[in-house]
Image (tube, helix red, strand yellow):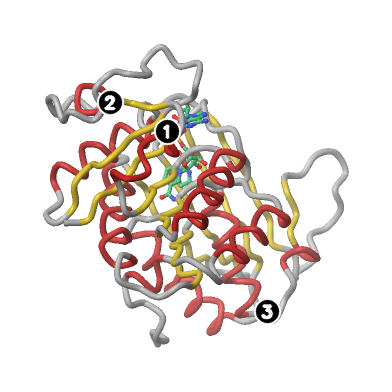
C-alpha cells in the first residue's frame, strides 16, 4: 500500500485528490496539509473531501506527519511546492507535482532535487491532454512551417497563472518539433497595431471565466483549411486520477525527473 500525503488538501484539486485516493486501489491517505492560517487545520481530511472520516487530521506542515507517508502529491503554488520538495529530498521520499507557474529558477531546483529522489512533474495529468501532446507532435511534423499556430486556453476565474502550464507545454512540444525556440517565437496576447503575423510565431490567448475546469485548443491554420486539436476537461477527477496513476508508477522508480508521458508510456513516436 502506498501512503500519500496531499498538500493543499482543501483546495479545488486537493478535495478531488482526497476522493481519488478513496477510489484507487493500492493507495491510502497518510497525511494532508493546508495553509497554516486555514481554519480547517485539525479537521479530518475525509470530511473535507466528503468521503467520510479517514482519521487523517489536516496539519499546517507535512514535516509534522513525515512518518505517515511515502510520497507527497502537490497541487498548490510554486513556493509551497518548493518547501515540500526540500522535505521530500531530506527524507528520501518521492513527489508528484501538478502545480504550475514555476519560474525557470524554480524549475531548476526541481531538476536538481530529482538527482536524489524520483519526481513526476506534469502541468496536466489527464490521459486526454497527454494524448493531445502526441497528436500535436504529429501535426507539427506533417504541417511544418506551412501553417500559423495559435494556442487558446480557458480556465475558471480563480486561476492565478497564465498562460496555463498545459498551454505552455503544448507550445514547447510544437516549437521543439519545428526546431523553434519558444522563448523567441511565443506571442502572449495582442493589442493595438500589432502588425502582420510572422509565420514562425506561436500565439497564446488566455480566457478566465466562471467555473471552466480547463480547455485547450491548438489551431494549425493554412490558406484554405484549418486543423484544431482540442481537449476539454469537465471534471477535476480526470487530473486527480492521473495523479494517482503517477503516484503508483513513481513509487518504485529510481531518482529522476519524469512526466506523464513516462507514466502513460507515451514516449514512443506516434506516426
Ligand atoms: N497538473 C494538473 O493536472 C493540474 C494542475 N493544477 C494546478 O494545481 C495548482 C492548484 O490548483 P487549485 O487546486 O485550483 O488551487 P487552489 O487554490 O484551490 O488550491 C491550493 C491550496 O493550497 C493551499 N495552501 C496554501 N498554502 C499552503 C501551505 N503552506 N501548505 C499547504 N497548503 C497550502 C491553499 O489554501 C489552497 O487550498 C495550480 O498551480 C494549478 O494550475 C490544477 C489542475 C490540474
Ligand atoms: O488551474 C487549473 O485549474 C488547471 N491548471 C493546469 C494548467 O495550468 O495547465 C491544468 C488544468 O488545465 C487545470
2 is higher (above) or lower (below) than 174 = above
Residue at 75% x, 54% y is 187
Callout 1 secondary element: loop
Callout 3 secondary element: loop
- Quarter of the image with the N terminus is bottom left
Residue at 15% x, 41% y is 22
| Separation of marks 3 and 2 at Cα, in angstroms | 54 Å
Tell me whether circle 1 and circle 3 mark residues in contact (CB < 8 Å). Answer: no
Q: Mark 2: few, some, or many residues within 10 Å (few <14, many ≥20)?
A: many
Q: Which of the two residues, 79 or 124, is positioned nearer the viewer here? A: 79
Residue 167 lies, in percent from the top left, at 56, 54
Q: Nearer the viewer, mark 1 or mark 2?
A: 2
| Separation of marks 1 and 3 at Cα, in angstroms | 42 Å
Q: Which residue is mark 1?
A: 8
Q: Nearer the viewer, mark 1 or mark 3?
A: 1
Residue 66 quadrant: top left
- Quarter of the image with the C terminus is bottom left
N-term-proximal mark, 1 vs 3: 1
Horizontally, residue 232 falls left or right of residue 87, namely left
Q: Which residue is mark 3?
A: 145
Callout 2 secondary element: loop
Residue 18 lies, in percent from the top left, at 25, 37
Ligand 1 contact, mark 1 (Cβ < 8 Å): yes
56 is higher (above) or lower (below) than 100 = above
Q: Nearer the viewer, mark 3 or mark 2?
A: 2
Residue 58 lies, in percent from the top left, at 33, 26
Q: Mark 1: few, some, or many residues within 10 Å (few <14, many ≥20)?
A: many
| Separation of marks 1 and 2 at Cα, in angstroms | 13 Å
Residue at 59% x, 33% y is 160
Q: Which mark is residue 57?
A: 2
Amino acid at each position: 500500500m502506498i501512503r500519500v500525503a496531499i498538500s493543499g488538501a482543501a483546495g479545488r484539486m486537493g478535495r478531488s485528490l482526497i476522493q481519488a485516493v478513496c477510489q484507487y486501489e493500492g493507495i491510502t491517505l497518510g497525511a494532508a496539509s493546508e495553509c497554516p492560517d486555514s481554519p480547517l487545520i485539525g479537521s479530518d481530511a475525509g470530511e473535507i473531501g466528503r468521503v467520510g472520516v479517514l482519521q487523517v487530521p489536516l496539519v499546517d506542515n507535512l514535516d509534522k506527519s513525515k512518518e505517515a507517508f511515502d510520497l507527497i502529491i502537490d497541487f498548490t503554488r510554486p513556493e509551497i511546492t518548493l518547501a515540500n520538495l526540500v522535505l521530500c529530498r531530506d527524507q528520501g521520499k518521492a513527489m508528484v507535482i501538478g502545480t504550475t507557474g514555476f519560474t525557470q529558477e524554480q524549475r531548476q531546483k526541481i531538476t536538481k532535487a530529482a538527482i536524489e529522489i524520483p519526481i513526476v512533474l506534469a502541468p496536466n495529468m489527464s490521459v486526454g491532454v497527454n494524448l493531445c501532446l502526441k497528436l500535436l507532435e504529429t501535426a507539427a511534423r506533417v504541417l511544418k512551417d506551412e501553417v500559423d499556430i495559435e494556442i487558446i486556453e480557458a480556465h475558471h476565474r480563480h486561476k492565478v497563472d497564465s498562460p496555463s502550464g498545459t498551454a505552455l507545454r503544448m507550445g514547447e512540444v510544437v516549437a521543439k518539433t519545428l526546431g523553434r525556440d519558444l522563448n523567441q517565437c511565443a506571442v502572449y496576447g495582442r493589442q493595438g497595431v500589432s502588425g502582420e503575423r510572422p509565420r514562425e510565431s506561436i500565439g497564446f490567448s488566455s480566457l478566465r471565466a466562471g467555473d471552466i475546469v480547463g480547455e485547450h485548443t491548438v489551431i494549425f491554420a493554412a490558406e484554405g483549411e484549418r486543423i484544431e486539436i482540442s481537449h476539454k476537461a469537465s471534471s477535476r477527477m480526470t487530473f486527480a486520477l492521473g495523479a494517482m496513476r503517477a503516484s503508483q508508477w513513481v513509487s518504485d522508480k529510481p531518482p529522476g525527473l519524469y512526466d506523464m508521458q513516462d507514466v502513460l508510456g507515451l514516449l514512443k513516436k506516434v506516426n
